[in-house]
Image (cartoon, grey):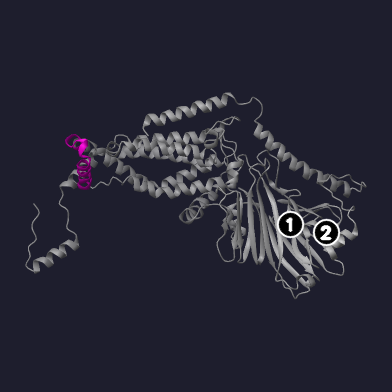
Amino acid sequence: MDRNSIIGIIIIAGILIFWGTLNKPSEEEMEQARRRGDSLEIVEQVERERQIREQLEAGEGEVETTDDVAKETDSVSDDELRSTLGQFAAAGKGQEEFYTIENELLKLTISTKGGKPYSVEIKEYKTYDSLPLVLFTGDSVIFGLNFFSQNRTISTNELYFKPSVDMKTIVADNSEKTLTMRMEAEGGGSIEYRYSVQPGSYMVDFDIVLEGMESITNNYNTIDLEWELNSPQLEKEAKNENYYTTIYFKPYQEDADYFNARSNKQVQEEEITTQVEWIAFKDQFFSSVLIADKTFSNAFVKYTDLPESEKYLKNFRAEIGLPLDRNAYTSNIGLRFYFGPNKYSLLKKKYSDLQLHDLVTVGKWIIKWINQLIIIPIFDLLNGFISNYGIIILLLTLIIKMGLLPLTYRSYISQAKMRVLKPQIDEINKKIPKEKSMERQQATMALYKKAGVSPMGGCLPMLLQMPILFAMFRFFPTSIELRQESFLWADDLSTYDAIIEWSEQIPVISNLYGNHVSLFTLLMTLSTILTMKLNNQATASTQQMPGMKGMMYIMPVMFMFILNRFSAGLTYYYFLANIITFGQNLLFKQFVDEDELLKKMQSKKTRQKKKSSFQARMEKMARERGYNTPKKR
């Protein structure tokens, strides 16, 4: 593909984008209105629950409730319940009520139906629409034990529990507070869920206490816990958020594993037959994690993409085997929930023993080490005394580029050597016609060898810098510190910085590029092309391989399409890195005398090469045997 073809493609793309801009609706963008409506629906549901609780606490008598808040099963007869539930018939009917236990960081709403976590709000954060950030909520949440009793299948998710307190809201402000949900069976025995919250923690202690249930569990070493919820869209760009929304799980004494959310598979599942330490339903910046004090016996995990949903990204499901002491009258199963941000510094500091910091996607192998040992520590250090994240990224880029300065200098010197050899390369091209391309190539390589120049000398230092670039590609899109932090025209450095948006679907363009133009991505692309053009201008390599001229521009354009939806912090970093590299090359040019460099290479060509020690020993052995080595002419 030649230069004119590339320019033609860019012009066509510009025309299509301009056409889409002209057809943009004058009113507020439809997508944002839909997102706000969905978020308001969630908040209104939580607010209805709060109002009902306040009325009950104020003693205002009977409160009218909707189907979403209270459900009665009085219409079901006792005989039907006994036939279906056996000794748990009494728990088969009741009224759904909501109790909250909270601290300054989170608010956990518990439903009496199933005694389960009904919703979780993270108080310090908001959605993109500046609404309360709710990790999950609604009747779609399933959480309960499944077991057999008297030849019946019992699911506690559908049964009614009784709270241990009358207060509808429990606040852990000064000390740990506990809310217990209890369900009793006829003839003795009970199941308790104990939720305990401490001040200043995202961790919720959760104990399951089975008392007098040995008649049910006597033949089993485990009891099944089912957990299912829908993960709502919390960020501006659903497609990008979905790339990081997945299930993580940590097998016992192994590294955490996960499903690749970028896979084309709409459904991913796995049967884990070994012990498991924790299972996480992870969003881009937040997670709901169920942790065993010891281990789970086994687990089945599954997620399903919900592409047709305007409200949710994925459905998460886990079936977990909880270990039991089947001979004990009372079995206490110790668990914990983590409801909070995927913040690497927080998870590493407080929960390193659980390895919850693996929830933050920082890459694998050398990419992971670079992020954990270099990038994140420098970022956190700067974050400790600078509040502007645009400035932090600038300083981070400067520090990294200074560390890579020796490699950048070597790359420049290699390119300078190629430039000063260009006249001699041109002479070779004049003497040897194009038809003798092999002979021309051999003569060129011979010149490089005599001058001590490697054609790949400029590429190798750049290749050594690639792990840093890939590390940044992993670091910025998952850094919650950048979430909703503004800089210049970007109102959120964790997502794209659109300067133009449109709602019309443009064939090919909308799928590959998106329905917006990110300015930092454009600046990154232009600066990359400019830097590459100036660095490679007039070098012998581009003369020898004219096809490389076209290839030089294809890669930046490809990255423009790929990164248009990505974090503005990432493209801002790449833009800064290009500008600093360009400035470094200008500085090198002031201090590197190319005429002197050519003289050194000319003297190196005429200098006789020193024999290696191995060659000297071989010649000595030959002389001792009476063989005289021929002299070089």
In the rendered image, which residue does mark 2 sit on?
161
Furthest toward the right, the residue is 61
Seen from the viewer's position, the closer of residues 532 and 272 is 272
Left or right: where 582 falls relative to 134? left
Question: Badges 2 and 1: C-beta atoms under 8 Å apart?
Answer: no
Furthest toward the bottom, the residue is 327
Seen from the viewer's position, the closer of residues 372 and 558 is 558
- Residue at 55% of width from left, 30% of height from top? 506
- Where residue 131 sits in the image (x, y, percent)? 70, 40
- Residue at 67% of width from left, 64% of height from top? 292
Secondary structure under tag 2 reads loop
Kind of residue indicated by mark 1: Phe
Left or right: where 209 falls relative to 576? right
Q: Is residue 178 visible?
A: no
Residue 413 sits above or below residue 15 on the image: below
Kind of residue indicated by mark 2: Phe
Q: Which range of residues does the magenta coloring cover? A: 428-451
- Where residue 44 sits in the image (x, y, percent)? 77, 41
Q: Say if the magenta span includes residue 439.
A: yes
Secondary structure under tag 1 reads strand
Left or right: where 339 falls relative to 581? right
In the rendered image, which residue does mark 1 sit on?
143
Give neighbour class at mark 2: few <14, some 14-19, many 20+ (Cα, 10 Å): many
Counting residues from the N terminus, which is met first, the one under dot 2 or under dot 1?
A: 1
Q: Quadrant of the N terminus?
A: top left
Q: Say if the magenta span includes residue 589.
A: no
- Where residue 185 sits in the image (x, y, percent)? 84, 66
Q: Can you tell which quarter of the image residue 398 is in?
A: top left
Magenta: main secondary structure equals helix
Residue 438 sits above or below residue 76 on the image: above
- In the picture, the disc for residue 448 is none
- Where residue 277 sits in the image (x, y, percent)? 63, 63
